[in-house]
Every structure is written in C-alpha cells, then in structure tokens.
Image (tube, rainbow, N blue to C red):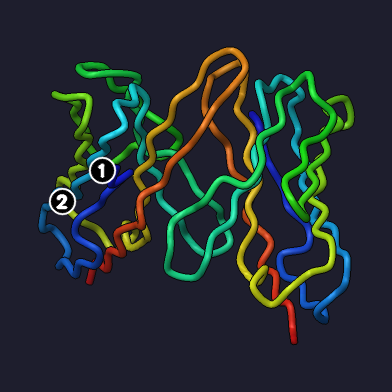
Amino acid sequence: KQEVTQIPAALSVPEGENLVLNCSFTDSAIYNLQWFRQDPGKGLTSLLLIQSSQREQTSGRLNASLDKSSGRSTLYIAASQPGDSATYLCAVRSSNTGKLIFGQGTTLQVKP
Amino acid sequence: NAGVTQTPKFQVLKTGQSMTLQCAQDMNHEYMSWYRQDPGMGLRLIHYSVGAGITDQGEVPNGYNVSRSTTEDFPLRLLSAAPSQTSVYFCASSYSNREYETQYFGPGTRLLVL
C-alpha cells in the first residue's frame, strides 16, 4: 500500500530564508508527484507536477525534485516571504490504482 | 469558469441525520473525486468517478454514497451521520493525459456531527 510522509509537520523560518520541504513515498510505481498549497480554510491549489520520467520542475521561486528510485521529493522555496505561509501537501498518483495519495502536509510560517 | 463549487460551506448535523454535499464543475472534466481532510491525516479519498454513470470506492467509502448522473455534478450523500464523519470535505475535478494532469479543488464543506 502506498504511503506518503511529509517531514517536518511544521516549520517556522524568518523572511528571506531558503527552505526545503520533504516528501517520501513507499512505492515507486507512480505516474506523477504533485505539490499543493493550502491556505487556512481554503481548498488546495496545485503548485507543481513532476511526471515519473522527470527529475524536477520549476515555477518562479519554487523548485520541486523527484528521485523515484529512493521514493523522495523535495520542494525548494527560495527567498521565502510571509505570503508563502501556508500548508504544503505532496501527493503521488499511483500507477497501480490510479488514485492520488496525499501526505499529511507541512505547515510553513514565514515571519516578517 | 466558476471552477469547482461546493455547497454548503458549513453544516451541523445530529447523529443519524442524512444530508447531501453538493459539488459541481464547469470545466467538462471526466474525473471527479471526494476527499475528507482530518487533522494530521492529509486528504483521504472517499469516492471517485471517471465519467457520468461510473463511480468507484476510495480509501474510506463506508457511510457515504455517490452518484454521477451528469458530467458536471458529483454529490456525496451521508446516509446516517456519525460523529466520526466530522471533517472537512473537498471535491475535486481533474483532467489528465499521458503527459499532463491538472487538479482543481473546491473550497470545502466543514461538517460537524453532534
């Protein structure tokens, strides 16, 4: 059974720091891996999607990497801003079941 | 486009009551799904549909029913509410092909079962 784990559960950093959020998964049989952002009381917004054949994707200050063989992904946020404060979730699309399996999320606070 | 809409935004039920959470999308997506989000547990898939007339169970389907009579609508029914169903419910629709996938989530319905 695919399991997705995100560490740490919460993170607090001062504004301007570069930071890394981690995601690990137990089954390498995936179509893709996605990173989402969730603001308090809101739905999820897709940030980046990495296909299983890709190594990384970039969007602005965000860079996501994927190492399928080791079951790991990282989300790198450069020059963090208070507006980056949110919960970040990763999810993998299983190639066995087709279902999207989510991690528990990392709640990020960027202090001014 | 309105995207994915959910109603109601908040609901309080008594144990044993039934209700329907509404979800609609205007993007002509074939794939729709329902998740519940509980503290510390991420999102868990309840039911999903790959097109009108086709539904299937996710990870936590017990106590919930779905139907998909049209491409646009995917309601979730709680048959007899229990306190364990207190949660935030998200509906999502998506489009995918071999090289691309996009997910859209609704704003959520907060359900409290007393």
Q: Residue A30: which quarter of the image?
A: top right
Is residue A16 or residue B81 the one in the foreground?
A16
Residue of label 1: B63
Is residue B17 toward the left or the right of residue A98 in the image? left
- Residue drawn 58% across and 62% down? B40
Could you tell me if the residues under marks 2 and 1 are in contact, i.e. CB atoms within 8 Å? Answer: yes
* Same-chain status of marks 2 and 1: yes
Q: Residue A71: which quarter of the image?
A: top right
Q: Residue B109: which quarter of the image?
A: bottom left
Is residue B14 or residue B96 the one in the foreground?
B96
Q: Amino acid at mark 1?
A: Gly
User: Which of marks 1 and 2 precedes in the sequence?
Assistant: 1
- Residue drawn 84% across and 67% down? A79
Q: Is residue A101 above or below residue B17?
A: above
Residue A82 position, x and y percent, is 69, 77
- Residue drawn 10% across and 58% down? B17
Q: Amino acid at mark 2?
A: Ser
Quarter holding the N terminus of chain A? Answer: top right
Residue of label 2: B80
Residue B99 position, x and y percent, is 62, 17
